[in-house]
Image (cartoon, rainbow, N blue to C red):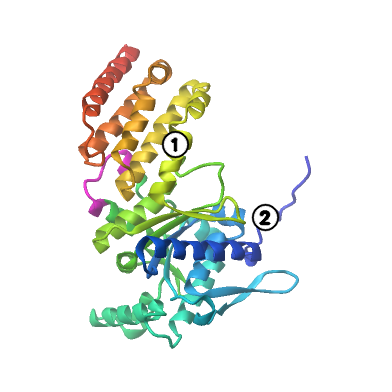
Amino acid sequence: MLPTGRNFYSVDTRAVPTQAAWSLGLKSAQQLIERHLQDHGDYPRAIGLSVWGTATMRTGGDDIAQAFALIGVRPKWAHGSHRVTDFEILPIEIFDRPRIDVTLRVSGFFRDAFPNLMHLFDAAVQAVAALDEPEALNPIRARIERERATWIERGVAPDEARRRAGWRVFGARPGSYGAGLQDMIDQRRWQTDADLAAAYRQWGGHAYAQNSAGDAAPDVFGERLATIDVVVQNQDSREHDVLDSNDYYQFQGGMTAAVRHLSGQQPSIYHGDHANPVAPKMRTLREEIARVIRSRVVNPKWLDGVKRHGYKGAAEMAATVDYLYGYDATARVLSDHQYALVADAYLFDDDTRAFLERHNPKALHGICERFVEAMQRGLWQEPGDYRERIEAVWLDSEQLQEGGRR
């Protein structure tokens, strides 16, 4: 054992984003724009991006670098220390596209660890908003001016109206974490998109800027969400996937549900694969979830692996179904055949079902409950005879649990 002393740290926050992260963020931003052009024939106007603190520590800030690139700003680094000292606004001619209005929904850990980055991004947004550029090339300036006028019409003082209109970084209130959706999904305490949107907006509706240290601003956050047409989340590692944690569906799915409800339109949803910094990939969320389902969720090799862990392995299978359902409830990204594929692998494969019955009947019951709930809510739209078959397994699993309690 070697002593660490009292001043160990994981990353120098003053050097984020690093030059390597800037290179990756720039590539990823360009890929996102190109993919949106291919899919829709036009540039995105407003993007919502979730930014997490642990990923920022691992990558040196590729998410925040991507956000800078999208608004057309480049960090400036000091020679020698490579610390970020300022930013420079790139002329519109350099990247030959409009600037894109970016709203950040930061995690609680990012808020705590990287206040300097929130302030730097805010300063960059305000500088871009001050440019004398037409709306077609600078929607940030145009939207801030429109919303400033709207707030003034509502009786807000001009300076305060401008302050609110310029906010682009939001998160949970100081001292709080998460996105506020897990309990709602787990406990089935929601009925419509309005419920999910209200929870997401209220939980994450605190503004962080040079002139705001977490002001409660759910209405302003709602205004931002209503303008978003693209929702993005990046992943920097293949050690896990989007169906390994409830955080992915809470942040990206929650933002999608809020945008869908507040704007009346389903946004485009993209997943940035940053696992290989040299060659990032931009996929739709549907494509990414389909890839994860095939490569892990129903992969016999993965199922054989978790079966070696008995009770815990069965719980992991049930958690995967929970996260799958949570993503569909919020982002609407699954097809009927994918529900059927997972049901076949987990409930109607004799060996797998016997494993669940033997090692963790509660997990089996939970899996059935999620499938039934998906049908009841219209997410699994046309289950056919799967409904009756799953309900039969559900009933059997209840009897197994009751037998185990006697």
Q: Quadrant of residue 98?
A: bottom left
Q: Choose between 95 and 159: the one closer to the eye.
A: 95
Residue at position x 25%, y 52% in the image: 193
Q: In the image, 72: left or right of 285? A: right
User: Does 214 sit above or below residue 305?
Assistant: below
- Graded by Cα atoms within 10 Å as few (under 14), some (14 to 19) or many (20 or more), the crowding at tag 1 reads some
Q: Which residue is mark 2?
A: 9
Question: Which one is earlier in the sequence, the residue at label 2 or at label 1?
Answer: 2
Place of residue 252 in the rendered image (x, y in percent of width and height, measured from the top left): 40, 53
Tag count: 2
Q: Which residue is mark 1?
A: 294
Place of residue 135 in the rendered image (x, y in percent of width and height, measured from the top left): 37, 82
Q: Choose between 388 and 104: the one closer to the eye.
A: 388
Q: Choose between 236 and 286: the one closer to the eye.
A: 286
Q: Helix, strand, or loop for circle 2?
A: loop
Type of residue at label 2? Tyr
Is 194 contained in the magenta span? Answer: yes
What's the magenta region? 184-195
Place of residue 299 in the rendered image (x, y in percent of width and height, measured from the top left): 47, 30
Q: Helix, strand, or loop for circle 1?
A: helix
Quadrant the C terminus occupies: top left
Structural distance between the alpha carbons of marks 2 and 1: 39 Å
Residue at position x 75%, y 71% in the image: 80
Instruction: Kindly tell me whether residue 256 is visible in this rendering.
Output: yes
Instruction: Kindly tell me whether residue 115 is visible in this rendering.
Output: no
User: Does 403 sit above or below residue 333?
Assistant: above
Residue at position x 23%, y 82% in the image: 153
Residue at position x 39%, y 85% in the image: 134
